[in-house]
Image: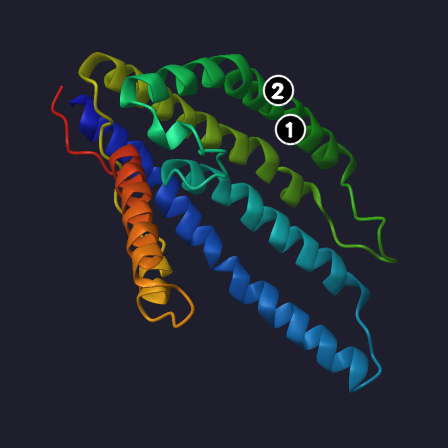
């Protein structure tokens, strides 16, 4: 298996898990609608729905972490980063992954496993509300999410190494992309003069191209 195929395989795992977890939004929406209906129209609030909605949201949030990393969608202070050469970007990323990411996620997996194991041993239930539901299955998501993020993080480290060797970022497994409406808004704006409009559109295109090269570079066969 070449490096590019390996990277796309890991991206595919993270993407599949993230999309599967996204369906929890429907369950969360249903729970909230049921609770609002019962609380305000029937005057029959249900305590456990509060706990269940927290668990659904927490599970979605944790399992989406690897997907966001695979799509390079985590928040980044890229004011200077986007103007750097790929090798410089890869150097910064590699240092930060080794110094901060690896120790942090390893600690998350280790502590999360102990946290979940203890919860299973004592049959832990929520104490937030009366007669709270069991939460040991929810706490099991912590080490699982940590392992998925670690797997994707190792893939990102490999991407950095490839970029340092070749001078170009290997491609990512394509999925949905953000819709950039800046150009369309500027094109139809009545409050921006033509020169300013053209300059702003050109700048937006430069940023978009830099982001595309960063996350969607050409396929590399190594």
| Secondary structure at numbered mark 1 | helix
Is 196 situated left or right of 126 in this image? left
**What residue do we see at 45% from left, 34% from top?**
79
Which is nearer the eye, 51 or 99? 99
| Left or right placement of residue 141 versus residue 64 in this view | right
- The residue beneath circle 1 is 112
The disc, 1 or 2, on the residue closer to the chain's N-terminal end is: 2
Q: How is the image coloured?
A: rainbow
Q: Total number of numbered labels? A: 2
Badge 1 crowding class, 10 Å Cα cut-off, few under 14, some 14 to 19, many 20 or more, is many
Q: Please tell me in which quadrant of the rendered image residue 114 appears.
A: top right
From the image, state whether disc 1 or disc 2 is nearer to you.
Answer: 2
- Residue assigned mark 2: 107
The secondary structure type at the circle numbered 2 is helix
Q: Quadrant of the N terminus?
A: top left
Work out whether residue 180 can be spotted. Answer: no
Relative to 5, 136 lies left or right: right
Q: Residue furthest right?
A: 130
**Residue 49 in the image, given as x and y percentages of width and height:** 73, 64
Q: Residue furthest bottom?
A: 41
């Amino acid at each position: 298996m070449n490096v590019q195929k390996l990277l796309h395989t890991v991206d595919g795992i993270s993407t599949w898990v993230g999309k599967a977890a996204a369906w929890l939004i429907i369950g969360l929406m249903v729970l909230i609608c049921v609770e609002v209906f019962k609380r305000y129209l029937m005057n029959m609030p249900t305590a456990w729905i509060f706990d269940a909605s927290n668990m659904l949201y927490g599970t979605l949030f944790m399992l989406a972490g690897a997907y966001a990393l695979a799509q390079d969608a985590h928040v980044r202070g890229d004011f200077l980063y986007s103007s750097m050469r790929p090798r410089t970007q890869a150097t910064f990323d590699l240092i930060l992954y080794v110094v901060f990411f690896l120790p942090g996620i390893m600690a998350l997996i280790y502590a999360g496993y102990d946290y979940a194991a203890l919860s299973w041993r004592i049959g832990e239930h929520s104490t937030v509300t009366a007669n709270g539901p069991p939460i040991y299955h929810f706490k099991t998501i912590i080490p699982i999410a940590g392992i998925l993020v670690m797997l994707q993080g190792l893939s990102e480290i490999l991407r950095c190494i490839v970029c340092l060797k070749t001078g170009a970022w290997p491609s990512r497994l394509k999925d949905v992309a953000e819709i950039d409406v800046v150009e369309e808004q500027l094109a139809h704006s009545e409050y921006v003069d033509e020169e300013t409009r053209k300059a702003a559109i050109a700048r937006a295109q430069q940023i978009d191209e830099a982001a595309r090269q960063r996350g969607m570079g050409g396929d590399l066969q190594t």
